[in-house]
Image: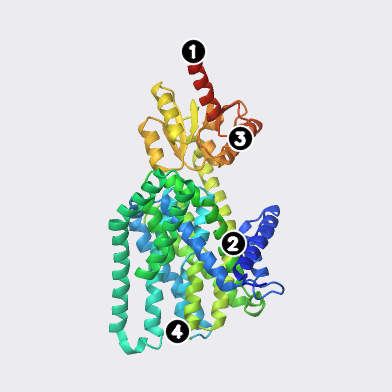
Amino acid sequence: MPHDTTLIGTLVAGLGVAFLMGALAHRLRISPIAGYLLAGTLVGPFTPGFVADTGLALQLAEIGVILLMFGVGLHFSLKDLLSVRRIAVPGAIVQIAVATALGTALGLWLGWPFAGSLIFGLALSVASTVVLLRALQARDMVETEKGRIAVGWLIVEDLAMVLALVLLPAMFGSRGDEGGSAGLFQSAGIVLVKVVGFVAFMLVVARRILPAVLHWVAHSGSRELFRLAVLAIALGVAFGAAVVFDVSFALGAFFAGMILGETQLSRRAAEETLPLRDAFAVLFFVSVGMLFDPKVLVEQPLPLIATVAIIVVGKSFAAYAIVRAFGHPNQTAMTIAVSLAQIGEFSFILAGLGVGLKVMPSEARDLILAGSILSILLNPILFTLMVRRIRAGEASEAGTDVAAAAVPAGPGVVLIGYGRVGSHIGGLICGRGERLTVIEDQKDMAAAAEAAGATVIIGDATKESVLRKAGLDTARTLLVAIPEGAEAGAIVRRARAINPKLVIVARAHSDEEVADLARRGADHVVMAERETAARMTERAMLAGA
């Protein structure tokens, strides 16, 4: 070909093979993540056939991490972050120390130098951003107390690794001996000043500029320009944070999202970035699979078992004990423990640093990569077992369905979405004294619904568990007021399965959506254009008479 197509080839191979392997995993009823990891191994350098560019794949995966953390920031607030600082800060520090000690001991037992063993232990101590957040989002836990603690814990781990990446070369690199302890403290001080400077800049300067820019773009009326502005802010702040303040891409993107999350446009910003977030998150798992050399399974089985045990058992036990020691319930402790029972992107960076400093053997990097893949594969299984155990414990203690009991039995009307249309509906229903339950995933809109007198469930209405929590099985009417046709169809189908006698009224924007919603079980579908035309025609006829 007349020009270089490495980037296109990497994208096509990564996404194409990931789709095939993900579909196979879905067919076998296992986590799609397993398929994505296998896809990476198939197009990686350690298996025959086509080999994608590993360096490009890792950079594309970094974009996925940026967009994912930006999306989490949109649903997070500074208040949420500060509310969990008493458990997240000491908990993350102690858990990092325990996991690092266990990894260091394993490295010394295998005959590695102390410096290499220490970096190996650090790499085993930090959880993957992508894996943790995907697990929490899949189970509607990001907005819960457990989810807030996990995300806060993740931020502390992120900051600790940023500090480690600066200090380790000063401690073990060729220049580290020249400055001694004074140089080490100077490096640590510079890192802390940069982190504080970044946080101050985001909270004082960016907090005023970024929302103003986004509001200006929104009022321009161009959806394309709005989408471009959101992506430019997410990627631009992340890149600027890394270049100017030497903090991670993920941390910069999280703060950008958190600042925009305080605006009324947060929901729209989240929707515009969702497709890209999902696509690049898949590329993250593909990139991990590309780094995996299957030979390590045969050549180092016992060290690999010990590595996985530290990640899955040692880290989890330490996190569980810490959370319980701070007085949190068993459910919270189990959630945090399972969430952290894996490693990912920062672990690869630390492994590369250790090998680059020539203090850690390449076998240690192979163990880190293999341990990452196995722990990522085990994580969905551990989450499933945890959820079953929690439900079994709740059933034995309460003897009733806790989810259904969260809302008074038999709400008159359940409303999905409290946006521009839903808020008008909710105001009219509450004004007539009807009992109304609102399902909403945006905090500002949920607060407005609660202020209007409705019972509010914060969560994703496409999840059956959330619909049941709202008491849909005993409700009289369901109103679906969200503008997204695909999500509305999924909600209608699940609602009809839960309660066949339910009267369902849905909102649509096209003839195709009207037909789809009716087919899925909606009793009445309101199309805005038709209703507007009918009212305008009625007014015109009255004026003519």
- Dot 2 or dot 4: first in sequence order is 4
Which tag, 3 or 1, sits closer to the chain's start?
A: 3
In the displayed structure, 104 sits above or below 227; it is: below
Does the residue at mark 2 contact the one at mark 3 (Cβ under 8 Å)? Answer: no
Q: Are marks 2 and 4 in contact (CB under 8 Å)?
A: no
What's the CA distance linking mark 2 and mark 3? Answer: 39 Å
* Circle nearer the viewer, 2 or 3: 3
Q: Which mark is residue 93?
A: none
Which residue in the structure is indicated by mark 4?
114
Q: Comparing marks 3 and 4, which lies closer to the viewer?
A: 3
Nearest to the eye among marks 4 and 1: give it.
1
Measure how far apart labels 2 and 4 are at the Cα level. Answer: 30 Å
4 or 1: tag closer to the N-terminus: 4
Residue 322 is left or right of residue 30, and the answer is: left
Numbered mark located on residue 544 in the image: 1
40 vs 402, left or right, is: right
Would you call the spot at circle 3 few (<14 residues within 10 Å), some (14-19), or many (20 or more)?
Answer: many
Q: Residue furthest front?
A: 544
The amino acid type found where label 2 is placed reads: Leu
Q: Label 3, on which residue? A: 513
Tell me whether circle 4 and circle 1 mark residues in contact (CB < 8 Å): no
Q: Check the image and name the residue furthest to the top.
A: 545
Crowding at label 1, few (<14), some or many (≥20) Cα neighbours within 10 Å? few
The one of 236 and 70 positioned closer to us in this rendering: 236
Q: Tell me the kind of residue under disc 4.
A: Phe
Residue contact between numbered discs 3 and 4, judged by CB atoms under 8 Å = no
Compute the Cα span from label 2 to label 1.
71 Å
Q: For the point 59% across and 72% down, which residue is it?
A: 54
Residue 2 position within the rendered picture, expressed as x and y whole percent measured from the top left: 65, 72
Where residue 44 appears, x then y in whole percent? Answer: 64, 72
Q: Quick one: SS at disc 4? A: helix
